[in-house]
Amino acid sequence: MKLVRKMKKIYNPAEIEKKIQDYWYKNKIFKVEIDSKKNKFYCLSMFPYPSGKLHMGHVRNYTISDVIARYHRMIGDNVLHPIGWDAFGLPAENAAIENNLSPKDWTNSNINKMKNQLKLLGFSYDWDREILTCSPEYYKWEQWFFIKLFKKGLVYKKESLVNWDPIDKTVLANEQVIDGKGWRSGANIEKKKISQWFIKITDYSQELLKNLEVIKEFWPDNVINMQKNWIGESNGMELVFKISVEKNINVFTTRPDTLFGVTFIAIAADHDLIDQCDLSIKKFSRSILNEMNEKSSSKKEINGVFTGLYGIHPVTNKKIPVYVANYILTGYGTGAIMGVPAHDYRDYEFAKKYNIEIVKVIKNLDHLDHKDDVYTGEGILINSDKFNGFNSKDASKSIIKFIEDNSFGKIAKNYKLRDWGISRQRYWGCPIPIIYREDGMMIPVDESELPIKLPDDIDFSVSGNPLDNHPTWKYTTCFKKGLKAVRETDTLDTFFESSWYQARFCTPNDPDNMVGEDANYWLPVDVYIGGIEHAVLHLLYARFFHKLLRDEGILKSNEPFKSLITQGMVLKDGSKMSKSKGNIVDPENLIEKYGSDTVRLFVIFAAPIENSLEWSDHGVEGCYKFLNKLWLTGYKIKNELYVKNNQDLIDEKKLKIILNKTIMKVTDDYGKRISLNTVVSSCMELLNNILKFMELGTIDGREILHAYKQLILILNPITPHICYEISNSMNIEEMKLTESWPKANKNFIKSDKIFIVIQVNGKIRKKTEINIHCSEEKIKQLALSFPEVKKYIGNKDVKKIIYIKEKLVNIVVA
RNA sequence: GCCGAUGUGGUGGAAUUGGUAGACACGCUGUCUUGAGGGGGCAGUAGCAAUAGCUGUGCCGGUUCAACUCCGGCCAUCGGCACCA
């Protein structure tokens, strides 16, 4: 055995890691282009906001994607693993105000710092694809696309009640309000009626919902569920109540089976019909609307007023009173409901308060003796004319058909999803490419004028939207007629940028296209990794955008992300690491102390990916010790390699079997199960076994060396620096190949002897080793012969003997 | 209230198709090495009990020769939505 390089006895990560990282970076080792001969694999982590410092959550996220990317490279895939910066957003503006810096400089310096930290962790990115969402080259395309959508009628401006964040001083989308608070500022959200830009995500409600069925195979259940909930499809019917010859009220219900239980109609406070009511009703409605504006969360007491109007029940022809009620939402369904107090809690509460008749039409079969006043479940229809005796499901179908046949209404669907509000009253974002001409026209700017760049000379000392306050920026002229015009000073929600970056990564530097043709080779992303907090924010928007791009003819696929992994939070002392709690572990200090391989190993080993990860200094130590042991073992093998002439062939085979089983298992774990913590366990076990056989000294050193080399290969995705260094000094040829993943040798998966468990009535009584070629009959006989087994059989009858191949024998006695 | 997920030693967790529960690690205990500390080695570590044996994967029941795994019903924890008709 010739040894090429010297290997030091002591593992010194500080010395080896820097050298290897520089080599990777300078030689663009992970640069990637289309290669039709290879299987493509697009591995992506949610790109970071450049806050200035990498935290443990980032480290975990990016380590996971790096491990997956490196594994796929080793099995010969063409791997796209890019990184970029979600660089627009409020923190830059706030920092600028506080420290009197420009948001641009602040952002750029943060990116530099974080890029260095990413390099310290040895992530295998194609750095040539780095993108920056605040660069005009990027946001130009967003403006271009905005204009396309505007012309299609998919973006529009409308005055409506929107969420106002009083701390960040901007409007927020519904998805960005969490528990009544702003997603970033945490401020209590107020309702304001202002004119805002919206994008018609609701046009895609049905498809966004339907395609969940397709992606759910490789997406976590909870995310699928949250999106399903958020889109919120309800099936039912719309029904028309005549008010007068020319006026109607349309109501939406999901319970057509309760049609005969309607005793009132309730409409929302901004319903069209209110215009025709008395002044007192109008005043009341306005007070309800004001109440809604004040607070969006907290529940209010049910409240309403009779309008004096009646609707005619289309089937019974009864006069049904119409009320304005504060529990009817504006903007959902038709803004009006049919009140069925016997079978809906809110309707019941309302009817009690205003002495409205309560008519039971559904009999509860499960609780016949119960005399509940309200029953919201399904049952058998009563008091329902010709539908009496039907069960709820059949009745609903029949009633919908009856209603449609008589033109009283129609089958209908409703969604909770609202259009996405995309304008923000902030500076550090993508300018909306719209101008307001002096003749009152609102038109998009011409493509040739793009990008509409953000001005750099901004005065933050005045409060309000800096673009609006800028002395010259917003004044322009119309390219068509030369008329004077004023620019839109709102900017786009930063979720706009992150909705399509995964497509831009495919052709990041294309000057002529938003997304080039290569995207159809790379997309969809094969594995996408990020936090659960984006379940209905970014992950919904990105799915929507992908469909917009498809319908514009730019992309061919339907969904951006084939599979999704939501990694758990990193905790310390039971809670999320945060500055205010003072429980932060700084990745850079840790790398300095142990090296990045230890940090990577720990975050992979300490918990399954989806679980939260409780920080443990002891655990980190343990990982560091493992790497030391790995190194020292390599050193010993290299320097104390021995040839053994009278080796123990049985032990040799044992080691081979352990090795090949390990290769099989970790291949499955990396590739199919994406269970990375168990990869580490298996590698630890293998090293323990190698050490055991070295100690025993029964096997030829070359076999030990072989097993060790394979261990280095399978560990390489997780701890690439130490593996690279060891493979150099021990001459592991495979590491240099494009396809370097070891294959399990099928000849060494099973040994000749196997352990069999012998049970009597399902309880283990004996464990024994048998020859693999032993016949079933013989094994059964053998099982019966053991005294430990006989003892439990006694003089009872052996009813049957079950034999599970190569696993166990169960003797059933009675 | 609705929807969903999860429940295994002191701790993180493993058990991939119903077939040896607790792999791998952390921690702890004993012990050896050292002047001491660190580091390292060896042995032990689900509970009760004596080495026999019994019990044990949130609880109750069921299916099965066999259940952490499947089914039914509870309980607890976490997450999402929440006047959505």
Image (cartoon, rainbow, N blue to C red):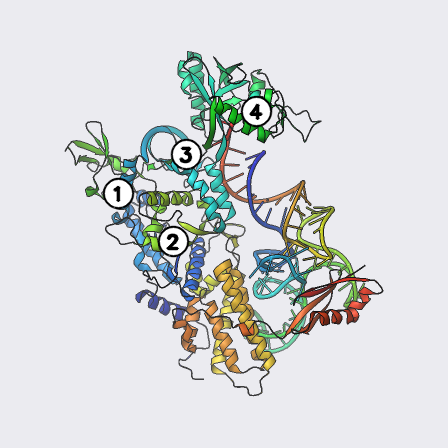
User: Label 3 vs label 2: CA separation?
Assistant: 35 Å
Residue A261 position within the rendered picture, expressed as x and y whole percent measured from the top left: 57, 21
Q: Chain of mark 4?
A: A
Helix or strand or loop: what does disc 4 sit on? helix
Q: Is residue A460 visible?
A: no
Q: Residues within 10 Å of mark 4 (few under 14, many from 20)?
A: many
| Residue at screen point 26% across, 37% down | A467
Q: Nearer the viewer, mark 1 or mark 2?
A: 1
Q: Disc 1 marks which residue?
A: A144
Question: Amino acid under label 1?
Answer: Trp
Q: Nearer the viewer, mark 3 or mark 2?
A: 3
Dot 3 or dot 4: first in sequence order is 4
Residue lying furthest right in this view?
Answer: A795
Question: Amino acid under label 2?
Answer: Lys
User: Label 3 vs label 4: CA separation?
Assistant: 28 Å
Question: Amino acid under label 3?
Answer: Arg
Same-chain check, marks 1 and 4: yes
Proximity of marks 4 and 2: CB atoms separated by less than 8 Å: no
Question: Which mark identifies residue A258?
Answer: 4
